[in-house]
Amino acid sequence: MIPPGTYTVGSATPKIDGFEESPAHQISIPDNTYIDNTEVTNSEYHDYWTLINGDTNATPHSWHDLPYSAAEGDLPVTGIYYEYADGYCKSLGKQLPSEDVWEVAASYASPSSARSIYSFGDKKDVFKPELDKYYYPVGTQNINQSALAVYDLTGNAWEYVSKSYDETIPTNLNVVRGGQNSFLLKNTERRVGNEVEFRMNQWAGFRCAANVPNPVPPSDPPVEPAPPAALAVGSLPTEQGFLDDFRNLDNGWLRVENDDLRYGNHPLQFFHLEAKHAGVNVLATAPQALDPGVNYKITTAAMVDKSNTEANAHYEYGLAFKVSDDRKSYLAFVVDPVSHSWELLKVADGVPEHVAGQEQTVDISPEVPKNLRVDFVDQENFQLYIGDKAVRETPYNVAGFDGTAAGLFLRNYDDSGKTHIHFTTFSFVKI
């Protein structure tokens, strides 16, 4: 049970971009407010799925085998629509927790207690889940408990909440909380989106809450909820170009990890590049190549998820284009959010060389996605854009690069740590 009383939720300095927060305000938790100790598991959800005669359209994304793999029965169920999470809780006489109930359970022991940043405390590095595994069996990581001994509110699965305490969030959108093991969110942070979007439902799990200590299931058996209306997803015919917002894990991009780097699809709706130490070029090329001799407009948006480098560290990320088949020769248009600079590089045999650039001119924040764009004037002249603004009026001429691949690029120049970048979109379109 959550002790009744008045609590502060939200942030004194709320973020409005990325994983947004609401301004700090007080809410009241009434008597008899309960939240489940653990997230709902694949095994538990399977019992409900069987009762409602769920079909393949209602099958959670986490069930790689049908009906599900018993070996993964203790993992949190993920990849379901909000209606099914809500229906599961109601079938037990419970409901999804509201956003204020979820945040209070993650942050406090009582109305008079100190407030924690994460459910397990104030220091993020106290909890170090195995990043090569998306999930672990619920309730098994004793370090990941809230002050109320509720497990896994931070990490493991993202969790649906029933109602946001922020009236500015449209009622047709959903809120998920807590993040994932490789993507830990603060107790005040949230993700907002439409449940039909793959980036939302693919990774969404849940737990239940109640208003009585021993809820009684309804007498009528549960029925399968009506699924939400489909959401149109933008795409491009192959003959026009390529567009990816990274909602779909089966989008053809490679996933690679070694001692130097890693890259691949990242929940929710990201593609990540990570350089683990200095001197590493990370290059991920799109699954579709450009047509030879054709001019294109290539665009991406990216933001810094995490950099363990010093405050004055040097790292750059952006677009790679004219990439050769052996991936050793290409051009890269990159930005450095620390020095607020941009640079055009030519890479030969993996070694980058400065072509052009300018410092203290880029209005870019590490936490806010920024659009980068390269327009082919022809096969040797390229116009560079940050947002909608060209870096100069005339294009840059770089000859000798004939590759037909394009993609995403990161380089870490600093010895003190790793850099992790999230790309939110990537496209190339024929001009």
Image (cartoon, helix red, strand yellow):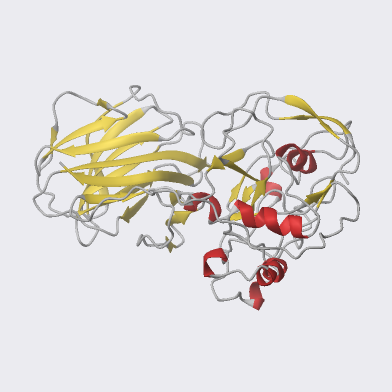
Q: Is residue 117 visible?
A: no
Q: Is residue 26 visible?
A: yes
Residue 373 vertical position relative to residue 273 in the rendered view, above or below: above
Whether residue 231 sits left or right of residue 118 in the image: it is left
In this view, the residue in front, 241 or 397, is 241
The part of the image, by quadrant, that contains residue 383 is top left
View extreme (front): residue: 220
Residue 327 vertical position relative to residue 160 in the rendered view, above or below: below
In this view, the residue in front, 342 or 293, is 293
The number of discs equals 0
Residue 12 vertical position relative to residue 65 in the rendered view, above or below: above
The part of the image, by quadrant, that contains residue 32 is top right
In this view, the residue in front, 412 or 295, is 295
The part of the image, by quadrant, that contains residue 286 is bottom left
Residue at x-position 51% and y-position 45% = 417
| Percent x, y of residue 76 | 67, 62
| Percent x, y of residue 277 | 46, 50
Residue at x-position 49% and y-position 47% = 418
Whether residue 387 sits left or right of residue 66 in the image: it is left
Residue at x-position 38% and y-position 33% = 370
| Percent x, y of residue 15 | 58, 29
Residue at x-position 70% and y-position 67% = 48
Quadrant placement of the C terminus: top left
| Percent x, y of residue 59 | 57, 67
Whether residue 180 sits left or right of residue 256 in the image: it is right
